[in-house]
């Protein structure tokens, strides 16, 4: 019941954070989703009774783990519009598959970013018809149609009374990331995706040509 025991959490990145006991659950508020969370169950003397590690990006498959994101975080991102790390898509379907994969590739090859499904290019929130199907498609495509497989996470949130699916793509460690159906790798410039040039593809990771080669050509 939580009266004689306590929970402590250690996050990769911010380290140990404060944990509250709310409505029968242990809750930790953090600004950014960590890769690994270590949870310790301790008694009133501080002795560790048990512990476990949780990977938040796999949380939907872990019993008893629920992750929620403040709605204001996404509303602020949408209000800022599309940019280097933000892309809006009205939906996710076979018609825009390659377009979506190009953005996933560009985000993985760059600094990462979020794709909002259910948001018009203008920033109008219209929602998706089937959030589960949208996440299932994102799962299938990201895992099979991008090489190598990128680091990503998809989740649904309610914004303005409708479902919006957010596909978070993290900066990749095995760049470049290629879209298999087209054979192209992409980079993000402003709010658009561009196929990487031969110079960018051949440049080592971290080399100026990889991240900024296009600037020398006047873009």
Image (cartoon, grey):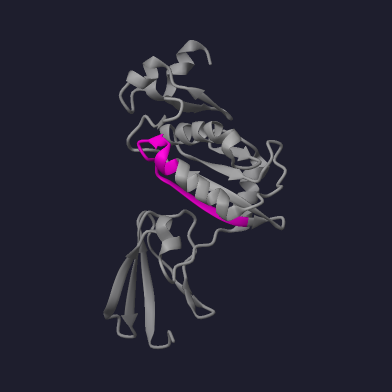
Could you say which quadrant of the image residue 62 lies in?
bottom left
Q: On the rendered structure, is 49 left or right of 83?
A: left
Determine whether 180 is above or below 126 in the image: above
Determine whether 25 is above or below 29 in the image: below
Of 178 and 218, the residue lying toward us: 178
Of 184 and 119, the residue lying toward us: 184
* Residue at the front extreme of this rendering: 94
Could you say which quadrant of the image residue 146 lies in?
top left
**In the rendered structure, does residue 156 fall within the stretch colored magenta?**
yes
**In the rendered structure, does residue 177 fall within the stretch colored magenta?**
no
Q: On the rendered structure, is 148 left or right of 27?
A: left
Q: Residue at x 60, y 34 (%)?
A: 95
User: Which residues, given as a range, are shown in magenta?
Assistant: 142-157
Determine whether 181 is above or below 125 in the image: above
Q: How many numbered markers are drawn?
A: 0
**Residue 84, x across and y down, in percent:** 54, 33
**Residue 7, x across and y down, in percent:** 38, 75
**Residue 103, x across and y down, in percent:** 51, 33
Q: Quadrant of the N terminus?
A: bottom left
Q: Residue at x 63, y 55 (%)?
A: 72
**Residue 219, x across and y down, in percent:** 53, 16
Q: Residue at x 36, y 21 (%)?
A: 201
Q: On the rendered structure, is 160 left or right of 86?
A: right
């Amino acid at each position: 019941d939580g009266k004689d025991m306590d929970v402590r959490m250690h996050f990769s990145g911010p380290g140990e954070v404060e944990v509250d006991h709310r409505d029968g659950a242990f809750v930790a508020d953090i600004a950014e989703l960590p890769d690994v969370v270590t949870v310790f169950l301790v008694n009133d003397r501080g002795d560790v009774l048990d512990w476990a590690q949780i990977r938040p990006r796999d949380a939907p498959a872990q019993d008893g783990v629920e992750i929620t994101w403040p709605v204001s975080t996404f509303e602020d991102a949408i209000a800022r519009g599309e940019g280097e790390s933000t892309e809006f898509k009205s939906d996710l379907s076979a018609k825009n598959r390659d377009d979506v994969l190009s953005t996933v590739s560009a985000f993985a090859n760059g600094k990462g970013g979020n794709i909002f499904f259910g948001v018009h290019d203008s920033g109008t929130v219209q929602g998706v018809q089937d959030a589960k199907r949208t996440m299932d498609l994102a799962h299938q495509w990201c895992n099979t149609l991008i090489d190598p497989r990128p680091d990503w996470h998809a989740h649904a949130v309610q914004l303005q009374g409708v479902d919006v699916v957010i596909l978070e793509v993290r900066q990749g460690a095995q760049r470049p990331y290629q879209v298999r159906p087209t054979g192209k790798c992409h980079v993000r410039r402003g709010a658009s995706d561009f196929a990487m040039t031969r110079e960018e593809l051949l440049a080592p990771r971290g080399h100026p040509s990889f991240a900024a080669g296009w600037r020398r050509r006047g873009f």
